[in-house]
Amino acid sequence: MNNENRVLSIEIYDTTLRDGAQGPGIKFSVDDQLRVIQALDELGVHYIEAGQPASNPKAEQIFVKVKGIKLNNSKIVAFGSTRHPRVKVGEDPNLNSLLRAETEIVTIFAKSSSLHVEEVLGISLDENLKLIEDSVTYLKQHNKKVFFDAEHFFDGFDLNPEYALKTLKVAIDSGVDLLVLCDTNGGHLPHQVEEITRRVAKAYPNFPLGIHTHNDTGCAVANSISAVIAGARHVQGTINGYGERTGNANLCTLIPNLQLKMGFRVISPEQMKKLTYVSHLVAELANVAPRDWDPYVGKDAFTHKAGMHADAVRKTKISYEHVDPFLVGNTTHITVSELAGRANLIQKAQELGIVLEKDNPQLKKLLQKIKQLEHEGYEFEGADASLELLILKTMGMYKPPFHVVSFHSRVNQWAMDRSAESEATVKILLPDNTFAHTVAEGNGPVDALNNALRKALEPYFPQLKSVHLDDYKVRILDAQKATKAVTRVLIESSDETRQWCTVGVSENIITASFNALIDSIEYKLLKCPGNVFSKSSKGED
Ligand SMILES: [Zn+2]
């Protein structure tokens, strides 16, 4: 990268709500769309493509609704195609829907590949140029800023470079404000994108260029960077790379790459700190689980496991982290594992809000305990709540608020024409030295146990009423003792303010589930304000 680029700016154009929404399983309601727009505005994205108003009547709604919210950084863009070959420009429903969207900017897409013009559209090459000319001129007459998406540009250039360039020339002559080169099929590689973009930049020097890539070769982000190296200063993509097939260029990777690695001015440092939050929010709204291994914003992007490795990270962050996670709103995570050393555990405890002194004699006991449990099949990486309880108990910082005296659960098959019923019994010793002995039914033995536990504990601990069990995962581990397999159960719980995860392991699935349930309940009670059952978690006692 040469020095002159270091102060240059790049514009970001987000198409999560249009191209991204075409991804499998991704669906945004109008309310979701508005929340995505607000989040993108906070992130400082320059342009937000809110949809294709002509695609269906519902798609026009967002352009009406968005007028009701104040945007500080972003401009809304409407997207649509050039006029239909058999319709006059002023009567074209698509172009008129773009005008009705009342945005300052519109993006129109047109075919730049001779193959697509002749074989798909079924018109002559000259006719296609006329569609471009008419459509751009019409939108310019209505005082729109016009971005020109050259669809299939790279494929078209491979096949017939003169024609591909000619479509751009007509667009420029008709008054477009920006040319966007699209790798619509996503089949190109970085060196090809760089070479072709360079040739366009040479053919039309100083004309603003943009890039729109798809990830079919796994190179969407790299291809966008190649186009930037060749002179593009406008980059299109989607949050988390959502999009058809293998997705679009991932803005959550591209934005930090362009700014933190290449020195372009893209968004402000304060806005950059919202990147992780925006990535996770959009995933939640799209109803897609976030990918923990995503660069920059993934939960594991800055996670360290091995003992020595984590020790080095604790001492000097740059030793194992390519950027400071704080810059993109992420954090360093240390996971506890069989490899974990003392430093690792201290750091992890700190993350959970527990201060452990390095020379505390109990620390050795805790490390041994964790190693033993991991050997038995426990894994605390996804179960911070169980780990926190374990640390507090082992270090003598916590006393459980109740004791389980006994429990059992069984499935009754009464008759062939009735489904099986589950029933569970628990006996609990409460803090006032009385016993709660309850029985309950449920959908399966674990549900029955949960119901019996709640029945026993809720009269004494009404705060448990707000706890929900969100997820229940069972994993059968390889037989470690040759004859018996071990079951590991992970339970995710939540209340109105937090979410936590607990783990239980046993040769018996009911016992494993019961242990994870008890941890979930104890954790809730531990975190309730004013609980009197735990000693100070800071160890001051
Ligand atoms: Zn696309």
Image: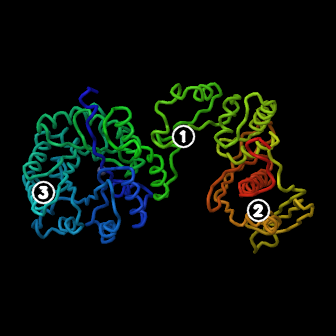
Please give the residue where the numbered disc 1 appears in the rendered image: 331
Mark closer to the chain start, 1 or 2: 1
- Quick check: 281 above or below 465? above
Q: CA distance from mark 1 to mark 2?
A: 34 Å
Q: Amino acid at mark 1?
A: Thr
Mark closer to the chain start, 3 or 2: 3
Residue 315 visible within the image: yes
Q: CA distance from mark 3 to mark 2?
A: 64 Å
Label 3, residues with CA under 10 Å away: few <14, some 14-19, many ≥20: many
State the residue in front, 372 or 466: 466
Please give the residue where the numbered disc 3 appears in the rendered image: 136
Q: What SS does tag 3 mark?
A: helix
Label 2, residues with CA under 10 Å away: few <14, some 14-19, many ≥20: many
x then y, percent, for residue 444? 74, 63
- Quick check: 139 above or below 222? below
Residue 227 visible within the image: no
Say which residue appears at 18% left-offset and 43% top-offset: 208
